[in-house]
Image: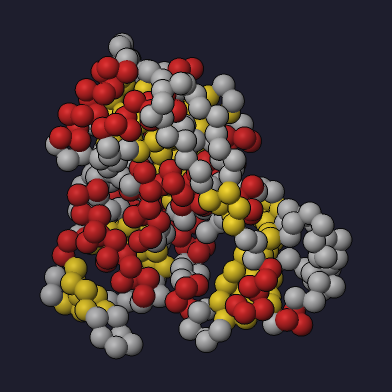
Amino acid sequence: MKLAILSCSPKCYSTRRLREAAEHRGHDVKVLNTLKFAIDLEQGEPELYYRQKQLSVYDAVLPRIGASITYFGTAVVRQFEQMDVYCANTAASITNSRDKLRSLQILSRHNIGIPQTTFVRDKRDVLPAIERVGGAPVVIKLLEGTQGIGVLLAESVASAEAIIELLQSQKQNVLVQKFVAESKGRDIRAFVVGDQVVGAMRRVAQGQEFRSNVHRGGRTEPVNLDATYCETAVRAAQIMGLRVAGVDLLEAKDGPQIMEVNSSPGLEGIEGCTQLDIAGSIIDYIAAQVNFPEIDLRQRLTVSRGYGVAEIFIPEGSEYVGKSINESGLREKDIIALTLYRGTTVIPNPRSSRQLEAGDRLLCFGRLELMRDLIPGKVRRKRRPKVHDLPELPVATEVIRDSEADDSAMKSKQDDDGNHD
């Protein structure tokens, strides 16, 4: 396998370990400076140049894109995708995970634990927002902070208001997040490669510091995660579309909660703590997947006029309940079932004899016009009860699909290598 590692820091621990692991396994590996590429666009021939020369052919790319070069870095990764080169993490998944708000928005529609979070711009919305997440103390986060930078704990409503007002005056976008008291000063970093957790560590803050990041002086200890935590970490990475990810979880009293999903997690902290060959696991996974580059369904499947991909929901009382996929008559309607979602279970390429149940969702490809009547309509949620009697507290009425009641569990930041713990 000929592998390119995209990194602006060839001498940092993570890049060195990945290169060593690839060379040890007999692969041809090059570390390429992300900023030294030129992207050429021509009809039918997407091309890349590196240091003014046409780039040679690579089998796979492992991106290590720093937060400061996200836009250009993801453009380079996207160009590799258009050239049908396997990318360990796609441009879209890196972009989604880099923004804390965007990543939580994506996770929020799934049945997966996240701390209650709110995002506001108007000063009048600050107090109601704090109340909705349970009141002070609250955690205030910058949208693109790394290594614990831009994460603050406000002990009172007054201090939270002052911090938010100050940050917004500096044109910073901030999240207000519920403070999970039982996890104060500690969290878990689970390293996900493919569909498994290959290593995990617990990070514990020292002294009065509530942030557990190693860069903030946090202490680490290896941890064996139970099935619930492993499943949550893997699902979070898959929902974000990441094949290599560092998933940060809080140990809440009601189960794991996703704090962040990182697309370029550092290796030094977790390899030193666990003594595991995490870099080797990454290289082995890429080598096994190199023949399966990312396919953008929106590009490939919707070019045929009238055809596309849609999700069909099987509600209680549907005529399809109790019938097999073959008996449903979908195939006769020019509709092919690609994947069946049942609760948190994903059944790819379901057999035609598979019996359908109420609550099932089918990802299908076929004629959009024939699938139109099978897609659930939108319903309004009931209004939430007010959490206090402030007359100006807005209570949102949200619009969602019926299918959001079930979790789709869909499979598919940091600065350069090692900047995350």
Residue 30 screen position, x and y as percent:
27, 62
Q: Quadrant of the N terminus?
A: bottom left
Q: Is residue 230 left or right of residue 327?
A: left
Looking at the image, which residue is at 56% across and 84% down? Answer: 306
Residue 407 screen position, x and y as percent:
62, 48
The answer to whether 127 is drawn above or below residue 98 in the figure is: above
- Residue 165 location, quadrant: top left
The answer to whether 45 is drawn above or below residue 198 in the figure is: below
Along the viewing direction, whichever of 82 and 364 lies nearer the viewer = 364
The answer to whether 21 is drawn above or below residue 322 in the figure is: above
Looking at the image, which residue is at 22% across and 61% down? Answer: 72
Looking at the image, which residue is at 24% across and 59% down? Answer: 71
Q: Quadrant of the C terminus?
A: top left
**Res 1 seen here:** no
Along the viewing direction, whichever of 34 and 172 lies nearer the viewer = 172
Along the viewing direction, whichever of 284 and 390 lies nearer the viewer = 390
Q: Is residue 330 left or right of residue 378?
A: right
